[in-house]
Amino acid sequence: MVQDLFKSIVKKERHSELYQNIRDNPIFLPTKMMIQDVFNTFDDVDGNFVEQFQTTGFDARLFELYIWAWLREMGAAVDRSHQYPDYLIEKGAHKIAIEATIAAGHFPERTTLTNKDNDPLLTRDVLSEEFQHFLRNDVPLIFTSPILSKLKKKYWLHEHCKDIPFVIFLGGFFENGSNLYTCGPLASILFGYEYAQNLSGEAYGRHIAYHEKADVKIPSGLFFQPTKEWADMENVSAIIFSNAGTTAKFKRMGWAKGYYNARQIIKRSGIMFNPRGKKPLNFEYYLDAPPFRENWGDEVVVIHNPNAKYPLPRDLFSDYVNMWYENGVLQTSAPKEGVYILFSMTSAQCFDDIRFHHPSVERITKSEFNKLIQISKITPGLLDMYWFKNPVNQKIAAIYYGGKGQLSSYYLFRIFSKREHSKTYRLTAESEKFQAEETALKDMLSAITATY
């Protein structure tokens, strides 16, 4: 039996703030339903997933669900019968062990990427010497802690992990706005190599020997085992990185599936890889009219270890960005198909002003509504706003907005009745003219509860 992630199993005071917001705030309904959707097919091997998700482990557990969604989208066969590592997958003729981890923690002095409402904002001067030092030194070092922690577990010694590639899948949750950091800082400390700009603004690669923290120089190039504590890095075939295992990703993917019961206007903006030029591309769009289909793996980067005992074939994940070291130079390949998003920000506005109470009528999501009518009946120029169902007489309804003037005066409704001996519905009644929202709701309730 599938467990409800949002049915509390702990005392309220133990809930994380983000968990409570997603559970209780209507604007997070797409996020909430998409998270539950993914969890419905997920095996809780440890038996403590729900408790950690609701309390102190929200970020880490959400990241695991994100990886699970990506693996299923990719079509990989996934074995979660073992407690460690998190995923044993088969893709093509290859078997791979994957362990998920995040760079977590809270650094109060480093939270200026967000405002008081936790909206990601680039308020920091990204060109300042202070930020550049933070990006070149602090961020790469933050990523080393979870990698080293996983190395000490020596998962590759487990019988089911022997003689196959072992991969660490890493995400950053170390401060508000961590999703704005790309794979660059991580790649720099793994390879001891970074890209810089000359006076003409052209990018060039250069080797780096160390990163500094509190006047201490820490060797770079973890893939080349610079110190004894990194000697086991040869057992790591690759580090996969993504900055998208976030609530925003689940919100957008949930919205695309119709997981909302009131119209939401969602805008996404960010920077994406430019396959035709050196400079990345800015993008901005509303989810109502996306320029491309979003996938779970659009932000995935596979960073190959040049000294791996069991190398990961580069063409195995060709649908994603790959990075590798060849002839002293860091190489990057673009996805064969689709896009690669460096980072993005999501903002949403929810139109959920409608209030009603009726004993036989219930609110449903757009996804439920579309499944029942099969083919959308929306006339061009109309925007469907709310969806309803009367299980008693097997009718469903939708309220639409169709005006360009005053928002309160351009609503109409349509009623669909179930066809006899069928699971589908047909249009049987609709408004004769545009109405105020309250009037459209009142007339819709009258029509959906009528027995004739």
Image: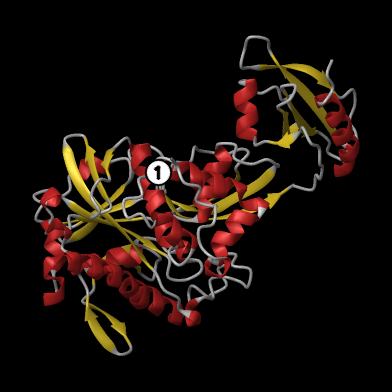
Quarter of the image with the C terminus is: top right
- Determine crowd level at label 1: few under 14, some 14-19, many 20+ residues with C-alpha closer than 10 A: many
Instruction: Say what secondary structure mark 1 lies in.
Output: helix
The residue positioned 67% from the left and 36% from the top of the image is 364
Q: Residue furthest bottom?
A: 215
The residue positioned 48% from the left and 56% from the top of the image is 246
Quadrant of the rendered image containing residue 20: bottom right
Q: Residue furthest top?
A: 421
Q: Please state the horizontal and vertical placement of residue 430, each as a whole percent of the image.
A: 83, 22
Does the rendering let one see residue 193?
no
Does the rendering let one see residue 175?
yes
Quarter of the image with the N terminus is: top left
The residue indicated by pointer 1 is 69
- 139 vs 164: above or below: below
The residue positioned 91% from the left and 36% from the top of the image is 439
- 168 vs 12: above or below: above
Q: Please state the horizontal and vertical placement of residue 26, each as a whole percent of the image.
A: 67, 51
Question: Camera-side residue: 254 or 51?
Answer: 51
The residue positioned 19% from the left and 65% from the top of the image is 153
Specify the amino acid type for callout 1.
Ala
Question: Camera-side residue: 375 or 347?
Answer: 375
Q: Please state the horizontal and vertical placement of residue 343, each as a whole percent of the image.
A: 46, 56
